[in-house]
Amino acid sequence: FNIFDSPDLFFQLEREYILQTPTSNDADADAANQVQADTRRIGKDIDEEMPSRYQLIHLNDEWYKSASGKRSKNNQPKRKHRKTHGKIGFLELSSVISKRWHKLDELDAETKNFVAKVASRLLEVYKRDMA
């Protein structure tokens, strides 16, 4: 993953959206209970420019760093392995998100603009830190 790429940032947001949005075939309430127990802040409280689709989704404050595999300057330890959610496999998840990304211009320009802005901001910070 490259943290400066809009598609990768979109993947992070959309993954959380898919995992936290109940589907019609979620027979048990386990997924709903997990979302209710989530103590992370919701999107609109993290960034006031968060697209409407993600405003009520629970995210880490630095959600854009989730996939980078990098730890922050204070040498945060890697997270411990967790059991998978069992809601959707990675291959299917990647396929769904990829299809949504390719249609994003026509379906949700707000989200596309948001992830492009975040990617640009991250690149600026990176260049400034490297100077």
Image (spheres, helix red, strand yellow):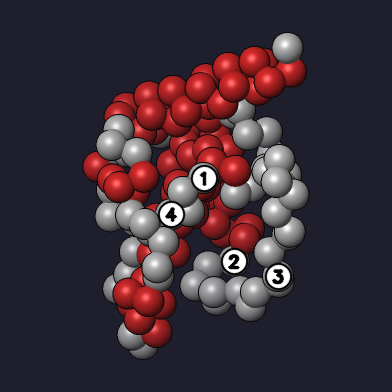
Crowding at mark 1 (Cα within 10 Å: few <14, some 14-19, many 20+): few
Q: Position of residue 91 (x, y in %)?
A: 63, 58
- The Cα–Cα distance between marks 4 and 3, rounded to whole angstroms, is 18 Å
Q: Position of residue 25 (x, y in %)?
A: 35, 77
In this view, 108 is above or below 121: below
Numbered badge on residue 59: 4
The reply to whether dot 4 and dot 3 touch (C-beta < 8 Å) is no
Using the image, determine if residue 19 lies above or below residue 65: below
- Which element is circle 4 on? loop
The first of marks 2 and 3 along the sequence is 3
Q: Secondary structure at mark 2?
A: loop
Give the farthest residue toward the bottom: 28
The residue carrying mark 2 is 89
**Label 3 sits on residue:** 80
Q: Is residue 18 visible?
A: no
The residue located at (34%, 39%) in the rendering is: 47
**Helix, strand or loop for disc 1:** loop
Q: Residue at x 38, y 29 (%)?
A: 114
Q: Residues within 10 Å of mark 4 (few under 14, many from 20)?
A: many
Amino acid type of the residue that numbered disc 2 sits on in the rendered structure: Gly
Q: Which mark is residue 62?
A: 1
State left or right for residue 13 relative to residue 78. left
Dot 2 surroundings within 10 Å: few (below 14), some, or many (20 or more)?
few
